[in-house]
Image (cartoon, rainbow, N blue to C red):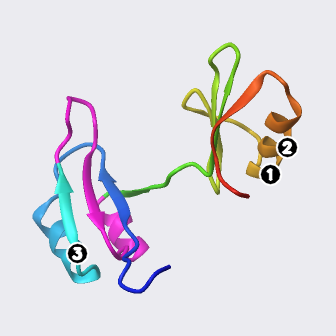
């Protein structure tokens, strides 16, 4: 990471705006906090922070950290497989494969093409 570059994490509050006490906890944990309202009904409220709060803060306010997939693959029938560090989803539904198994399986099948695949 370059000097001066700050990691950014996204936290979501899926059911409601961030409570004032949650905002206070986020300000105490991070130097930089910005909020993003949902662009349409049903989408979560988001906070972008440079440091994550403790897990107990996330649990207490029912917040979750949004993680980006490590790899995204698409089949010739438009099935989308997203491989995260801790899980694998196909069209938004969690699958029973480990990320390592999923990486191996999609690479072996000709019907899958990489959409967003890192250097790993």
The disc label shown at residue 28, or none:
none
Which residue matches tag 3?
A: 32
Counting residues from the start of the chain, the first of labels 3 and 2 encountered is 3
Q: In what element is the residue under mark 1? A: helix
**Horizontal side of residue 32 vs 69, given as left or right:** left
Residue at (26, 31) in percent of width and height: 42
Magenta highlight range: 37-61
Q: Residue furthest right?
A: 108
Dot 3 crowding, Cα within 10 Å, few <14, some 14–19, many 20+:
some
Place of residue 30 in the rendered image (x, y in percent of width and height, measured from the top left): 27, 79
Mark 1 in CB contact with mark 3 (< 8 angstroms) = no
Place of residue 80 in the rendered image (x, y in percent of width and height, measured from the top left): 61, 27
Dot 2 crowding, Cα within 10 Å, few <14, some 14–19, many 20+:
few
Place of residue 87 in the rendered image (x, y in percent of width and height, measured from the top left): 65, 48
Counting residues from the start of the chain, the first of labels 1 and 3 encountered is 3
Quadrant of res 35: bottom left
Which residue matches tag 1?
A: 100
* Residue 97 appearing in the image: yes
Q: Residue 49 lies in magenta, yes or no?
A: yes
**Horizontal side of residue 14 vs 9, given as left or right:** left
Residue at (58, 26) in percent of width and height: 91
Residue at (42, 72) in percent of width and height: 55
The disc label shown at residue 104, or none:
2
Q: Residue furthest bottom?
A: 3
């Amino acid at each position: 990471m370059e000097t001066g570059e700050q990691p950014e994490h996204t936290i979501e509050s899926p059911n409601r705006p961030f409570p004032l006490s949650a905002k206070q906890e986020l300000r105490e944990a991070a130097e930089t906090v910005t909020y993003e309202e949902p662009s349409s009904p049903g989408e979560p409220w988001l906070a972008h922070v440079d440091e994550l709060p403790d897990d107990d803060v996330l649990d207490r306010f029912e917040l979750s950290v949004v993680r980006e997939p490590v790899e995204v693959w698409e089949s010739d029938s438009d099935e989308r497989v997203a491989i995260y560090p801790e899980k694998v989803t196909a069209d938004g539904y969690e699958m029973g494969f480990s990320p390592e198994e999923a990486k191996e399986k999609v690479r072996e099948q000709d019907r899958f093409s990489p959409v967003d695949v890192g250097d790993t």
